[in-house]
Every structure is written in C-alpha cells, then in structure tokens.
Image (cartoon, rainbow, N blue to C red):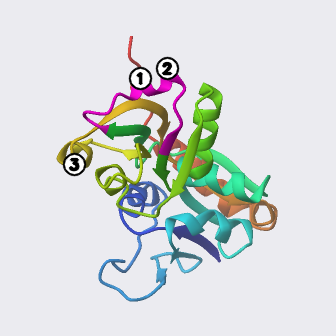
Amino acid sequence: MITLALSKGRIFDETLPLLAAAEIEVLENPEKSRKLILPTNKPDVRVVLVRATDVPTYVQYGGADIGVVGKDTLIEHCAEWGETSLYQPLDLQIARCRMSVAVPADFDYAGKVRQGARLRVATKYVNIAREFFAAKGVHVDIIKLYGSMELAPLTGMADAIVDLVSTGGTLKANNLVEVEHIMPISSRLVVNQAALKLKQQPIRHLIDTFAKAVKKPEVVD
C-alpha cells in the first residue's frame, strides 16, 4: 500500500492531473466526503487528507509514504525540526505563488528600512521572515498569526506582513501593497526515506511519472 498525504484545496486539485498521468483516480471528492482516507482506483494506493502544515510530519514519521507540500511549509518544518529524513525529488511546479512583504499603501517602508527603524511584522512564516530581515540587517519583532494577516497592519498591530501572494487581489482590497518579493513558492513531492527503500519500485514509478508530467516553467529571454 502506498499512502499519499495531501491537503484540501489548491494543492489537492492541482495534484489530480499528476495522479491521472499515473492512471490514479481518487474515488471520492474531499469537499463532499467526511472521510480522511480516500480510496483510489488502484487498490494499493490511497490518499490521506491532512492539514498542509502537517504533510511533512506525516511523511517524516511514516504516516504517509509520500506527500505534496508547499516550499513555504517545507522550509518552516525543516527550520523547526532540523534536518529531516524527507527525500525531496521533485519540484512539481503546482500551486505556484510568491512569498512577499506587504505594507499599507501609505507606509514608508523604504524609508523605515533605510533609517534602521525596528519593524513589527505579522506572519505565520516566522523562520522565513526572520531570516529574510536578518539578511538585510533589519531589526524586526515577529508577531505570529495563523490567518487574516491583512488585519494586523489595518488595526495598527503590525507595520508589515509576510505572506503568500497569488493575484494580489486580497492585498489590494485591503489597501496593502507588495514592497518586496522574498521567494517564489511552488509545491514539492516529499518521500519517506524508509518507504523509498521498502517500496522502491512503486514509489520510483510514481516519481518518474510525475517528473514526466510536470509542467516546466516558461523561459523568459
């Protein structure tokens, strides 16, 4: 049995074409089913639904053999747990977005940074934010939140936020603007090292099939 850990939403939806390339079909809709373990048309493959932040943990500790997880979550997981046994063979190029710094439209971010002011930054990506600002020599107080980041500067609780941005529509609707891009984000395939040894043939087959199905990013001249 191969167990694949996925989170509901965009990652699940964008993983389906990769599974289809391997002739794997998830038989139940996670948005309609109450089940946390979903069967597929392959009797030896199943999908477990977990929170996005828990995918690396399930794979690391053997609750799943493989998983799909955003680079942002993976960085935070490795920063918290140190070096893990996760094998990361593929950037799947799905659920693509960017990690950015955003501030209210009337906030003089460049001036504050230049003057060496101490910034209050709200984010759930604590390690990414801390390392980014440390590399710039900017002093920050990190305020950890789990959602509705945009509220923090609107209520005066923070000067800036570090968060994922896709279209930028939510920022615009809340009168926030991106002032720095930290890194591009996409989802990775992660594999448990022990499972790779014990179930080498089926897992290698999946890795190879996904690799052939991955859409390569466009090259810009």
Q: Is residue 70 visible?
A: no
Q: Residue at x 26, y 45 (%)?
A: 171
Q: Residue at x 44, y 31 (%)?
A: 181
- Amino acid identity at mark 1: Ala
- Residue 117 belongs to magenta span: yes
Residue 149 is situated, as x and y percent measured from the top left of the image, at 38, 55
Instruction: Give the answer, above or below, for where 193 lies relative to 50.
Output: above
- C-alpha gap between disc 2 and disc 3: 25 Å
Instruction: Give the answer, above or below, for where 187 lies relative to 55.
Output: above
- Amino acid identity at mark 3: Asn
Q: Which mark is residue 114?
A: 2
Q: Of 188 and 2, which appears nearest the observer?
A: 188
Q: Of 167 and 91, which appears nearest the observer?
A: 167
Residue 75 is situated, as x and y percent measured from the top left of the image, at 63, 49
Tell me which numbered mark, 3 or 1, is placed earlier along the sequence.
1
Q: Which mark is residue 110?
A: 1
Q: Residue at x 66, y 46 (%)?
A: 89
Q: Of 175 and 188, which appears nearest the observer?
A: 175
Q: Are marks 2 and 1 in contact (CB under 8 Å)?
A: yes
Look at the image and give the residue range highlighted in magenta: 104-120
Q: Which image quarter holds the N terminus?
A: bottom right
Q: Is residue 150 left or right of residue 117?
A: left
